[in-house]
Amino acid sequence: MSILQQIMQIDDQQLRNLDQISTYNDYKVKQIIGVGAEGQVSLIEDENGKQLALKINNVHIPQDKVKLLLELNHKNVIRIYDIKTENIVQYCTMEYANQGDLNQFLIMRQRLQQPLSYSEIQSIFSQICRGVMYLHSKKIVHGDITPSNILFCNNQVKIADFMQSNKSQLVYSAPELLIQQEGPSKYSDVWSLGIILYQMLKGRLPYLTTTEITLRKKIPVMDVPFCFKKIINCCLIYQPINRIRLINIMRTLEKGNMILESESFISSAVNTADTNINFE
């Protein structure tokens, strides 16, 4: 029986009982931690207790891209350790993000009625941008930058799910993807970053619909530091070529940080395990 068949047979009761586990190579498969259209992710553990994530892909990563992914090494990008194919299934062993994702974090802070401080936003967003800049420097377009694909691991922000960029969530997608049906690009990644920054600042998405008329409108960004307002306005430009470059986003953040440093820093818990994350 393949590892895919073993994992798919684990029911809810077995997931709650860690004695009921399968194996993958020398790893114990502890539980399923995510399921999506392209596959699922399980938590695995080696003989020394080190935890990793095992992603089972229904959509294969091309072989010419596998070598590049295995060579990626940046503190703000999830590390890929191994990619193997068995029959029609592809297995990807990667770094495990032990502190949840940005989507969970934003939901939790809303429930607690604790908006993110500007210092937190500056730190999180800077790390997101550094990770995306690194991917672009390796000629990798993410194509699906969303809060669910921004993970927290050992008090650092990590970009994930950059292996397949053929699908993206509508609310974070650039106009050229939605209307012109173009493929993702570094410019569409910048648009997604603008949406995420707005969401962190305002606690909601900037657009209620994704029609051409709506996406052409300039979004009013009120009562936020100028550096954030400038970045959002320059990310959410309808014409891709006119959007701000990532290097200029970083420069704007660095200039704005001198003002933000005067604000008291707020530490917070990020996931259901009450893990404290300090964004430095």
Image: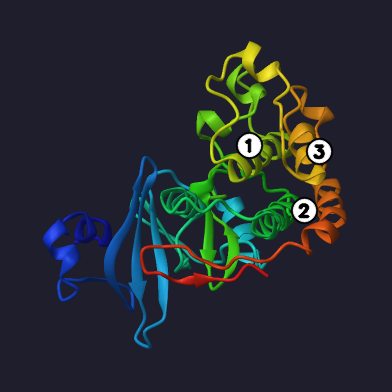
Question: In the picture, which quadrant includes the N terminus?
Answer: bottom left
Q: How is the image coloured?
A: rainbow
Q: Is residue 226 above or below residue 19?
A: above
Question: In the picture, which quadrant includes the C terminus?
Answer: bottom right
Residue at the far top: name it: 213
Question: In the visual, does 141 lie left or right of 29?
Answer: right
Task: Assess whether mark 1 and mark 2 are in contact (beta carbons under 8 angstroms).
Answer: no
Question: How many angstroms separate mark 2 from mark 3 (CA)?
Answer: 24 Å
Q: Residues within 10 Å of mark 3 (few under 14, many from 20)?
A: some
Instruction: Locate residue 64, reporting x and y percent.
Output: 61, 51
Disc 3 residue type (three-letter): Lys
Disc 2 residue type (three-letter): Ser
Q: Residues within 10 Å of mark 2 (few under 14, many from 20)?
A: few
Would you name the residue on which mark 3 appears?
Answer: 230
Question: How many angstroms separate mark 1 from mark 3 (CA)?
Answer: 13 Å
Would you name the residue on which mark 2 appears?
Answer: 137
Q: Is residue 70 above or below residue 252?
A: below
Instruction: Locate residue 133, reporting x and y percent.
Output: 74, 53
Front position among marks 2 and 3 = 3
Would you name the residue on which mark 1 appears?
Answer: 195
Q: Residues within 10 Å of mark 1 (few under 14, many from 20)?
A: many
Disc 1 residue type (three-letter): Ile
Q: Earlier in the sequence, mark 2 or mark 1?
A: 2
- Label 3 secondary element: helix
Instruction: Locate residue 34, reporting x and y percent.
Output: 35, 53
Q: Earlier in the sequence, mark 2 or mark 3?
A: 2
Q: Nearer the viewer, residue 274 or 74?
A: 274
